[in-house]
Image (tube, coloured by chain):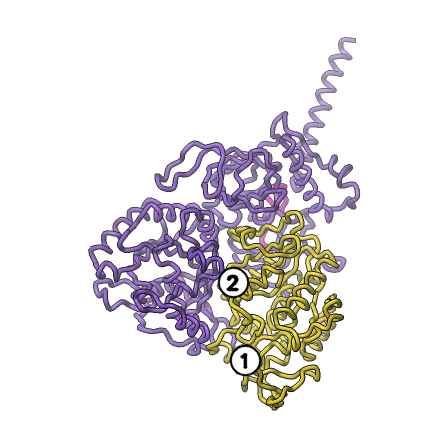
Chain colours: A purple, B yellow
Amino acid sequence: MTALALARDIQPRAPLSLPAMPARPEFPDAAGDLAQDVAGSLHVLTCGSVDDGKSTLIGRLLWDTAGLHADQRETLQRSPKTAAGTPDFSRLVDGLAAEREQGITIDIAWRYLDTPARRLVIIDSPGHEQYTRNMATGASHADVAILLVDARGGVKEQTRRHAAILDLIGVRRVVLAVNKMDLVAWSQARFNEIRTEFEKLADRFGFDDAVAIPVSAVLGDNVARRSLAMPWYDGPPLLDHLSRIPARGATPGGAFRFPVQLVVRAGQDFRGLAGTISSGEIGVGDEVMEPVGGRRARVARIVTMGRDLASARQGQAVVLELDADIDISRGAVLASPGLAPPVTRRLDARLVWLSDERFGADRGYLLRTATDLIAIASIDIGAHLDLEALAERPASTCGANDIAVARITLGRQAAVDLFSDQRETGSFMLIDPISGASVAGGVVTAAHAPETRLGRNAFRLTRDLLARGIGADLPPDRASEPELRRRANEVAILLREAGVAVEIEDTWGRAGLDAATAWLALMGLLSFGFVGAVLWGLV
Amino acid sequence: MTAPLTHLDLLEAESIHIFREAAAQFRKPVLLYSIGKDSTVLLHLARKAFYPAKPPFPLLHVDTTWKFRDMLAFRDRTVRDLGLELIVHVNEEGRARGINPIDFSPSVYTDVMKTQGLRQALDKHGFDAAFGGARRDEEASRAKERVFSFRSEGHRWDPRRQRPEMWRLLNGRLGPGETARIFPLSNWTEKDVWRYIARESLDVVPLYFAADRPTLERGGSLLVRDDERMPVRTGESLRLRHVRFRTLGCWPLTAAIESDASDLDSVVAETLAARVSERQGRLIDHDEAGAMERKKQEGYF
C-alpha cells in the first residue's frame, strides 16, 4: 500500500439522513482503524455548573473512546479515586496547575478525541457564573453544545443563561445531558420531568436540534455505551448522538463571502487576493463584487499550491485572481452581485463584554471584522440582556460578563452582514487601541442605511489630508493602501481619545466618493453659473 | 460542484488562514523552525499560504549545538532546496559557559540554550511575532493555548493576560512591550500531522524511521549517541539497536524507541496504534510536575 493510499481521507458521511448507529457496548481500540482518516470533525462545547460533573463527563469520554495513551491511564489509576471508587476522570481534563488547585476551570481547554465516526473537538468551558464570557468564547467555536445538569437539581437559572448565550452566539444544536442519574435511582419520572422543562426552554430559542439524554458520567452510563440501568431510555447514548450530527465542511450554505486577507504578488504579472471562503461557493468565470466601492470583476483563476481549482467552497483557503485589475486590498469582502452584504456606517449589535476593564464611552475602540480593522466613531449602550428573565433592561454602560445591546457608529463605511445570515462576516470583536486587548465579542443584529457624513461635528480625515501629511513618506500607489489605512485608524484613535468624533474618507469607496465629489463640483459650477448669471444680469 | 472537504482539508485551510492573518497583522514575523515533523508541516503550510509568492518571513533555528547531525543536514538541504532565508542563533554566552545536557540538569540546559537563546534571537532581530508548531494535544498545559499567544515584556507568558479568541477572528494588535507566538497547528493532533505528511508526500528527517543506531540505556531511556561528547559511563555499553524517534529534540535528551517502522506507511501505522503519549520521549518534560507550564511562563516556546 502506498503512503498516499494509506493516508487518503475518506469522505464525510452524507448528511441527508441520520444513519442508524447500532448500540456499541465498547469501542474498538484506536489501533483498529489504522488506515482511515477520521470521517469528519465536530466541535462540541460542554457547559454546566461547577458541580454538575462536566470535567468528569469529558474525562469519561476520553477514557471510554481510546482517546488516552497507556501512560495517561496509568497516571490516573495511581491518582486518588472518587467516592464511588472509580478513577477521578476530571483529573484528565483540568489542565493548568492553578486550576487543579482551585478545583474550578478558569479558561477554555481543547481536547481531541477520535471515535469511529468523528474527530470530536471538545471545548471545555467553565461553569462558574462569573465566566459567562468564557462560555461565550467557547460557544463561538462550537457546532453543538452539551448542557450538563445534575438530575437532582434539574434545569436551573444557570441552564437558562447558558441556553441564552448559545442562542446569542449562534449554536443551533443542543444536547441536555442529565447527569448523576445514579443518584436519583435511575428514575424515569425524574428524567421526564427535566426533559419537559428543557423542551420548553429549547422551544423558546428555536434551536434546530435539542435532545435530552440521561447519563451517569462517573459510571459511564449512556456516555459511550448504552446504560443497562435505564432500559426505559430508547434514545442513543451521548456519543452515538454526536456521531449522527453532520460534520464540519459537509454542506456549504449561504451566499458567497470572501474576506480578503492579503494581496499576493508574484513576479511582474501576478496579483491575487488571498482569503478563506467564509460562506457559499465560487467558480472560475463567476462575477464578484466589492460592496463598498461597487466594483465588479470575474474570477479568472482559483490558485492553490500544486494546482488551480475550477471551483471552491466554504472553508477553503485560496487565492483568487480576477480578470480586471480593480483596487481591492485587505479588509474588503468579496460577494456575488445581488447577494452582497449591506454597506453601512451604523449598526446594532449585541456585545458580550469580555474584559475586566469596563466599557468607556470615550475609548477609541477598534472594530475587528473578519479581516478589517475599523476605527469606531461612537458606541451607545442602550440595554443589557437579562439572561434569567430573557428581557432587556435599560443601561448605558457595561462590564465583564454583561451582554449589552449597542448601537455602533463606524469611522467609515463597511460591508457588514447580519449575524443571523452570516456567522463569520456578521461577527466582530472590539479592540482596546492601547493595550490591544480584545474587550468584547459582538454579533450584528441590524445594519442601518448608509449615510455619507456623520454630521457637522465630526472631523473628516480625507485621503488628501492623510496622503500629504502622515502618509507623505509612502509611495503614491495602492500597495501603500493598507499602511495608509492603518495610520488613518491610529490618528482616529488619538482624536477620539481627545473627544473628537472622526470620519475617515472611504478608501475603497473612492469610486463612489469620486462620483459624489464630481456631482458636488458640478452643482458648485452650476450654482456659481447661476449666481454669475444673476450678477451679470444685474449689471 | 465542489467535493465536501475532508478533515485534513479543513485543518490545512485553518492553518493557512492563521498564517495569512499573522503576516497581515504583524510587522516582522519569523517562523521558528525546529526541523522535526511539526516544523515540516508548518513550513509546508506557510508555503501554501503565500503561493505563488514565497513566505514573507525568514526561518529561525535556535541551535543548542546538541542537535542530531541528521537534523542539521536536513535543515540545510530544506532551506537550500526551497530557496528560503534561514537565521541560525546560538546562545554564545551559554556556549562559552559550557552549558551542556550531559553535565547540567535538563531544566538548566533547556533554559539557557533553548529558552534564553530564543529570547536573544527574537530581541536581536526585533521580531514581533514567531510562528511555532505547538499543538494543543501535546500536553495538558497546552490545551488552553490560544492561536495568537501573547508574551509580556521579557517574553513571559501570563495565563491571565491571554486574549479570548472568538469565531475565526484573530486580533494581532500588540500592547506596549508585547510580542506574539502564533500557533497555526493548534488544532492538529499527532495523527493528523503524520497523515498529512503522508498525504502531501513530505520529506522528514530520517531519524523518524527505524535503522541500526548506536544506543545506550540510561535512566530507563534508550539514547542514541550522536557523537563523542557523551561519555559512556561504567556499566553502560554502546549497542546497535534498530530504533527510531517519535519526537526529535537535543539528542542526549530525546529517547528512542525500538521499532521496525522503516518507511512512512509503517510509521503512520505505529503512531496510530501507539499506547504511550508522544512527549514521553522528551526527558525535559519529566523533570518535575507541571514542568511544561513553568517553562512556558519563563518563555519556553
Q: Is residue A288 magenta?
A: yes
Q: Is A514 in front, or is B224?
A: B224
Residue B267's tag is 1
Q: Which quadrant of the structure image shows residue B31?
A: bottom right
Image position of B98 with respect to A178: above or below:
below
Q: Amino acid at mark 2?
A: Ser
| Residue A304 seen in render | no
- Neighbours of disc 2 within 10 Å: few (<14), some (14-19), many (20+): many
The answer to whether mark 1 and mark 2 are in CB contact below 8 A is no
What is the span of residues highlighted in magenta in the rendered image?
A: A286-296
- Residue B185 position (above or below residue A208): below
Which element is circle 2 on? helix
In the depicted view, which residue is nearer to us: B160 or A253?
A: B160
The dot on residue A41 is none
Q: CA distance from mark 1 to mark 2?
A: 27 Å
Residue A164, how many percent across, how many down?
Answer: 39, 45
Amino acid marked by disc 1: Val
Q: Position of residue A173 (x, y in %)?
A: 38, 54
Q: Is residue A295 above or below residue A210?
A: above
Instruction: Give percent across and percent down for residue A408.
Output: 54, 36
Q: Chain of mark 1?
A: B
Lateral position of residue B64 relative to residue B16, left or right = right
- Provide the secondary structure element on which disc 1 rests: helix
Picture mark count: 2
- Residue B141, label in figure: 2
Instruction: Tell me: A394 left or right of A409.
Output: left
Query: Relative to residue B120, is residue A103 drawn left or right?
Result: left
Q: Based on the displayed image, in which of its 4 quarters is residue B291 positioned?
A: bottom right
> Is A24 rendered above or below residue B30?
below
Q: Position of residue B42 (x, y in %)?
A: 62, 66
Question: Sequence-wise, which precedes: disc 1 or disc 2?
Answer: 2
Residue occupying image coordinates x 75% and y 68%: B92
